[in-house]
Image (tube, helix red, strand yellow):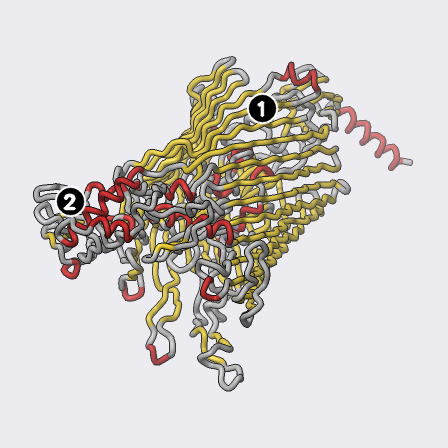
């Protein structure tokens, strides 16, 4: 009885001394559209317990009365604090216009508030990628993020896009970043084996992207360890949100032409070619006697005056349609979508058609368990003509076939004749009767389970799938063209890539005190990945004598082969972050990777990083500043790796090959050594230092982010000479090193903000310098016009220095060496010299928008400067008469005519044998340019009108893509947007598009 009295007394005392509980009710809505927000976390400041808003945005919370301040947090929205005062009922509107230093950003294996991030991470909102008339998201990154160089390898729809983050970091291995989609490290690049160019990322519909994060430094990227050296790009697809089901429909249709055909590169007209060829004949024989017969031998007088560039180009048409639905309740959310995209390129026989479907489900099973799946399914068909100097390539034909030739005969039938030397086939006939197509079916998906073991401790298991198969068909008809002598040919290729990833992580969050002033986040995990590729090839000649059907060969033996390749990773990872008062953040990452690609002595590697951030705006001397909204300093350093050897997954292994005419004997299969191997081969190591500052002032009206980085790469893979007595000329070893240093700057500003008008502007620029610091025996590596030399840029250009035409004789001249003191017309007396580099000194973008009420005008400019670009087929189109049977470009009209003429074009002589068209700086141009990448005029229909018809949003827009290009080298002969290596290879022309679109939401 005495114990009971003591217990009752203790309870009464506790009740009398505890603060009174007050019930607070409220509602939370979206500040933009006023709709209720479900799932918003609401808690009393200083307390750990809290509640979430229901489907109507309502909540009920008992507060102690100590602080009477409520804290509201919701992913994608700015956190809010609300002082209750004496109120027991409140309402709050939350905004997605978060402060730059507090927004939530997707990072490695999770997400973080930006103010806590210690690394260089750039975020791009998914809205930047919606309804753009480009096939893949990597092509839309141009000018969006400082330090990210993104260029098209071709204007072919579905072409490979080349991306470099903070420069080139390798010689033999890949310099492409790692792409991770919804937690799955995916295979990227061109997996086609016969198609001119393709892109594994072309199967992902950019309209389904929620956000994209670019991880640029060690602190941000090293959690991906051995594949983080070239940066990491994280893509998160769209998810459903709690609330009513929302339907969305987007449509766009556009047409256009080639974006940039420089006047210098245009082929000569009928009159110009006739006059120039006549001069060339006279200069070759010494008089004009016989010139008419000479011209007639080339086709002159047949009644044709063909502009072949017009023949091989056409209006390019782009159309896309997207339908989506999303929504859910507090337990289950969903997002589903379907898309149709079709683009007809501006060059004949170049097309792309894609169908995609996407589903994303998230279900809360209980207070401890949540599950979800994402699945993206796509199929696309791509028709790709040849590029480069293939003499069945339409762009080559457009520039080199003469005006005397014509695609059709007088009776309207197709002309099957060909140019004799060099042999160029009628591109219209090739486009009509031959086929070069690729079909790709792709599945990308994840399934995950989250289990809350204890408060603050969560286990996540995620299985990811990245699967695609490519079917390629190359049919060459039996009547004319490359396969006429073999009665036609048919090649079919099947490529299957199956990539799976299994990731298991434990996340532990600890508040060291009740007010969460000091917090810790710890992540540990295990990940395994395996990717397998199967290649099947079939080829035969002697197809049926018809062109209406593509049928297998019937008369010649068929060739069939199969091969495979694979790689696997096994990894343990950990990350620790400490944060104090949201002022100071410390982060450390550690990952151990094992890879099947490397030698038995070095199959495992350990990678790490440390980073720190200081939010000065939270300090007492700045917290009440009227000018500074945010100020953050950060720094990081670490070691990560490059293990991307996709070109040869077995480079480290000594291998034997089997079969082949040189080793088979008496119908018995022979074997031979195929690769010398190297058991010590290991990862290239990347050691990046990054120092950054983030500043925002005037209530975020102006913000700046600047980074300095020094990225040192060692153990570069290099082919090392080997005694030929071994049977091999080289073997691969970790020998070289290089360095990339640079500065990145991003500025965001809202110069004018009024009730009805707003002007926003974003500018970013990156300056990078590459320097090779070590090679095998410091010996130069020369490949054509490229030289890799210690102390120089890895893309240095090495060639003769052109000196123009001799004013007295009209002969071509070169400087004898880099001093430019002596000239000669004898190419055997000339030394190569470094004349520049294909790597730009700077590149970036300018994005701006003007909004007045519902009307918005926005534009994006891209720019690049400081690099050289190479017209590698210029020796044909500006040949000084060496290839007089081909059309020439407009530059030849500047050819030397008489003594005293000052020009860079030598005398035009039919059959020119002086070698004046030898590769030299003559065919290199400055790559400086500015391009208006996007210009959009849109109108948002007022909500008052829409509410009457049950619609949430309606947007109508007009858009232009690649509308204007300014090349700063007046002599350049091609579009200045070229691949990373700066080589123009007669690619499919980049397209300019005018389109109209409609976005509706219900």
Residue at image location 64% in from the left, 49% down from the top? 445
Say which quadrant the C terminus sits in: top right
**Side of 19 where 851 appears, left or right:** left
Estimate the spatial distance between the alpha carbons at disc 1 and disc 2, rounded to whole Å.
58 Å
Observer-nearest of 682 and 794: 794
Q: Secondary structure at mark 1?
A: strand
Secondary structure under badge 2? loop
Query: For residue 894, which numbered disc appears in the image?
Result: none
Query: Which is more toward the observer, 736 or 664?
Result: 664
Q: How far across and how far down the image is residue 311, in percent?
A: 41, 42
Is residue 703 in view? no
Mark 2: few/some/many CA within 10 Å (<14, 14-19, 20+): many
Q: Quadrant of residue 694?
A: top left
Query: Which residue is at 38% across, 78% downward?
Result: 727
Relative image position of residue 306 (x, y in whole percent): 36, 42
The answer to whether any part of residue 447 appears in the image is yes
Q: Which residue is mark 2?
A: 896
- Side of 786 relative to 625 (left or right): left
Residue 830 lies in quadrant: bottom left
| Extreme-right residue of the structure | 1
Q: Quadrant of the N terminus?
A: top right
Image position of 398 with respect to 748: above or below = below
- State which tag comes first along the sequence, 1 or 2: 2
Q: Is residue 686 above or below residue 147?
A: below
Q: Is residue 878 above or below residue 672?
A: above
Question: Which residue is the site of mark 1?
Answer: 955
């Amino acid at each position: 009885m005495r114990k009971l009295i003591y217990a009752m007394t203790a309870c009464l005392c506790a009740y009398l001394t505890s603060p009174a509980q007050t019930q607070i009710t409220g509602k939370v809505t979206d500040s933009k559209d006023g709709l209720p927000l479900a799932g918003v976390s609401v808690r009393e400041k200083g307390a750990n317990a809290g509640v979430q808003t229901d489907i109507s945005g309502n909540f009920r919370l008992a507060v102690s009365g100590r602080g009477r301040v409520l804290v509201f947090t919701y992913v994608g929205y700015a956190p809010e604090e609300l002082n209750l005062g004496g109120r027991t009922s409140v309402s709050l509107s939350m905004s997605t216009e978060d402060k730059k230093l507090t927004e939530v950003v997707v990072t490695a294996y999770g997400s973080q508030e930006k103010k806590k991030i210690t690394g260089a991470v750039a975020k791009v909102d998914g809205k930047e990628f919606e309804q753009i008339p480009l096939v893949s998201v990597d092509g839309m990154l141009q000018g969006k993020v400082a330090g990210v160089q993104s260029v098209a390898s071709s204007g072919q729809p579905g072409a490979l896009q080349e991306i470099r983050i903070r420069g080139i970091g390798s010689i033999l291995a890949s310099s492409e970043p790692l792409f991770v989609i919804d937690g799955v490290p995916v295979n990227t690049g061109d997996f086609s084996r016969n198609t001119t160019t393709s892109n594994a990322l072309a199967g992902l519909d950019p309209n389904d992207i929620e956000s994209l994060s670019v991880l640029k430094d060690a602190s941000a990227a090293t959690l991906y360890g051995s594949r983080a050296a070239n940066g990491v790009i994280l893509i998160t697809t769209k998810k459903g949100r709690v609330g009513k089901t929302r339907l969305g429909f987007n449509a766009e249709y556009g047409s256009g032409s080639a974006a940039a055909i420089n006047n210098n590169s245009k082929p000569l007209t009928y009159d110009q070619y006739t006059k120039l060829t006549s001069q060339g004949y006279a200069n070759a024989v010494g008089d004009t006697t016989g010139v008419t017969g000479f011209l007639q031998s080339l086709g002159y007088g047949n009644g044709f005056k063909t502009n072949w560039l017009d023949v091989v180009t056409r209006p390019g048409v782009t159309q896309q349609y997207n339908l989506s639905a999303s929504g859910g309740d507090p337990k289950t959310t969903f997002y589903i979508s379907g898309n149709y995209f079709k683009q007809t390129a501006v060059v004949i026989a170049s097309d792309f058609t894609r169908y995609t479907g996407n589903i994303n489900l998230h279900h809360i099973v209980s207070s401890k368990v949540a599950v979800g799946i994402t699945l993206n399914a796509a199929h696309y068909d791509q028709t790709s003509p040849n590029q480069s100097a293939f003499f069945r390539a339409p762009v080559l034909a457009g520039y080199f076939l003469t005006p005397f030739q014509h695609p059709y005969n007088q009776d309207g039938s197709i002309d099957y004749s060909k140019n004799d030397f060099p042999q160029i086939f009628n591109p219209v006939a090739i486009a009509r009767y031959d086929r070069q197509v690729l079909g790709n079916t792709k599945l990308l998906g994840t399934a995950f389970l989250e289990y809350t073991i204890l408060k603050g401790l969560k286990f996540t298991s995620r299985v990811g799938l990245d699967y695609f198969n490519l079917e390629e068909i190359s049919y060459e008809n039996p009547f004319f063209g490359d396969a006429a002598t073999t009665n036609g040919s048919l090649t079919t290729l099947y490529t299957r890539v199956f990539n799976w990833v299994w990731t298991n992580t434990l996340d532990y969050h600890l508040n060291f005190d009740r007010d969460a002033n000091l917090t810790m986040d710890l992540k540990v995990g295990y990940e395994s990945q395996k990717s397998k590729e199967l290649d099947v090839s079939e080829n035969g000649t002697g197809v049926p004598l018809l062109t209406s059907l593509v049928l297998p060969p019937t008369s010649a033996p068929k060739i069939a082969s199969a091969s495979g390749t694979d790689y696997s990773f096994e990894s343990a990872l950990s990350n620790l972050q400490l944060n104090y008062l949201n002022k100071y953040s410390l982060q450390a990452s550690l990952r151990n990777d094992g890879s099947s690609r490397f030698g038995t002595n070095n199959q495992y590697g350990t990678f790490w990083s440390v980073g720190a951030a200081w939010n000065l705006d939270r300090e007492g001397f700045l917290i009440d500043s009227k000018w500074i909204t945010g100020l953050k300093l950060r720094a990081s350093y670490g070691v990560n790796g490059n293990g991307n050897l996709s070109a040869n997954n077995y480079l480290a292994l000594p291998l034997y090959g089997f079969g082949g005419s040189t080793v088979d004997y008496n119908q018995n299969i022979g074997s031979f050594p195929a690769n010398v191997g190297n058991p010590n081969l290991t990862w290239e190591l990347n050691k990046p230092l990054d120092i950054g500052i983030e500043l925002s002032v005037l209530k975020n009206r102006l913000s700046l982010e600047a980074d300095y980085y020094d990225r040192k790469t060692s153990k570069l893979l290099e082919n090392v000479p080997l005694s030929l007595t071994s049977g091999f000329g080289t073997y691969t070893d970790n020998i070289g090193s290089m360095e990339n240093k640079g500065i990145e700057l991003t500025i965001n500003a809202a110069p004018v903000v009024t009730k009805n008008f707003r002007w926003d502007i974003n500018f970013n620029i990156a300056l990078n310098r590459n320097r090779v610091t070590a090679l095998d025996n410091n010996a130069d590596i020369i490949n054509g016009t490229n030289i890799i030399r210690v102390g120089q840029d890895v893309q240095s250009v090495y060639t003769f220095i052109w000196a123009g035409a001799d004013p007295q004789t009209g002969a071509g001249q070169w400087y004898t060496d880099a001093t430019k003191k002596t000239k000669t017309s004898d190419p055997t007396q000339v030394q190569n010299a470094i004349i520049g580099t294909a790597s730009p000194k700077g590149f970036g973008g300018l994005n701006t928008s003007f909004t007045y009420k519902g009307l918005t005008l926005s534009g994006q400019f891209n720019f690049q400067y400081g690099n050289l670009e190479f017209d590698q087929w210029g020796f044909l189109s500006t040949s000084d008469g060496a290839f007089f049977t081909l059309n020439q470009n407009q530059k030849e009209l500047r050819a030397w005519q008489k003594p005293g003429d000052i020009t860079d074009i030598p005398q035009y002589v039919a059959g020119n044998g002086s070698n004046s068209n030898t590769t030299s700086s003559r065919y290199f141009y400055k790559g400086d340019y500015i391009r208006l990448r996007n210009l959009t005029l849109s109108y948002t229909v007022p909500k008052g009108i829409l509410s009457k018809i049950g619609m949430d949003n309606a947007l109508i827009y007009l858009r232009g893509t690649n509308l204007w290009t300014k090349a700063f080298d007046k002599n350049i002969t091609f579009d200045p947007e070229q691949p990373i290596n700066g080589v123009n290879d007669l690619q499919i022309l980049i397209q300019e598009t005018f389109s109209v679109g409609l976005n509706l939401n219900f």
